[in-house]
Image (cartoon, rainbow, N blue to C red):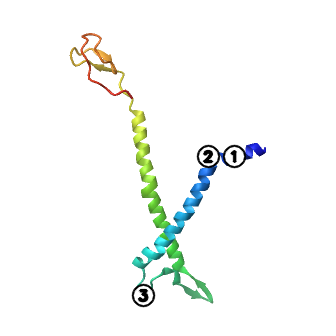
Amino acid sequence: MLKDFKDFILRGNVIELAIAFVVGTAFATVIKALVTDMFTPLLSIPGHVSFANLHFTVNGSTFYYGDFLNTVIAFLVVAAAMFFLVVRPIAVVTARLKKRQGEAPPETKECPECLSTIPYLARRCSQCTAEQPEVAAT
């Protein structure tokens, strides 16, 4: 049982998940700083440099809606970054791979000299022995 646990822990996807978590946490810190230091001042309400200090009070309870606004902006920035830097490029690559896999070369072609049907990868025509243009084998 201990060997199975060791195999599970040392399996590649568990280690990759741990690395992704650490990188994701660091990325979240960078995005939070980007939102707080760069985007919030650009979007700020006149007279307020940071949304974090915006609040209102009802019956003695204070609601910090500015901090919520910072969090929403950070989420939108992360979502946009993930979409444009990860999701779209992977979708494009996946579509290209599917297209490439779906395109099988034809089995036969016509000889340009005698118009007989010959195998697609043939270098000479079996009927007239004419040399065929080079084709890339896939």
What residue is at 42 percent from the left and 40 percent from the top? 97
Q: Which mark is residue 108?
A: none
Whether residues under marks 1 and 2 lie with C-beta atoms below 8 angstroms apart, the answer is no
Q: Position of residue 78 (x, y in %)?
A: 48, 64
Foreground residue among 57 and 91: 91
Q: Secondary structure at mark 1?
A: helix
- Mark 3–mark 2 Cα distance, whole angstroms, equals 51 Å
- Mark 1–mark 2 Cα distance, whole angstroms, equals 9 Å
Q: Position of residue 39 (x, y in %)?
A: 43, 74
- Mark 3–mark 1 Cα distance, whole angstroms, equals 55 Å
Q: Nearer the viewer, mark 3 or mark 1?
A: 1
Q: What's under tag 3, amino acid-wise?
A: Gly
Where 98 falls versus 86 (above or below)? above
Q: Which mark is residue 8?
A: 1
Q: Is residue 126 left or right of residue 77?
A: left
How many residues crowd around disc 1 within 10 Å: few (fewer than 14), some, or many (20 or more)? few
Where 56 falls versus 90 (above or below)? below
Q: Which mark is residue 47?
A: 3
User: Can you name the residue that lies furthest to the bottom here?
Assistant: 60
Q: Is residue 61 left or right of residue 69?
A: right
Q: Secondary structure at mark 3?
A: loop
Q: Earlier in the sequence, mark 3 or mark 2?
A: 2
Q: Position of residue 128 (x, y in %)?
A: 24, 10
Q: What's under tag 1, amino acid-wise?
A: Phe
Q: Which mark is residue 12?
A: 2
- Number of numbered labels in the structure image: 3
Q: What's under tag 2, amino acid-wise?
A: Gly
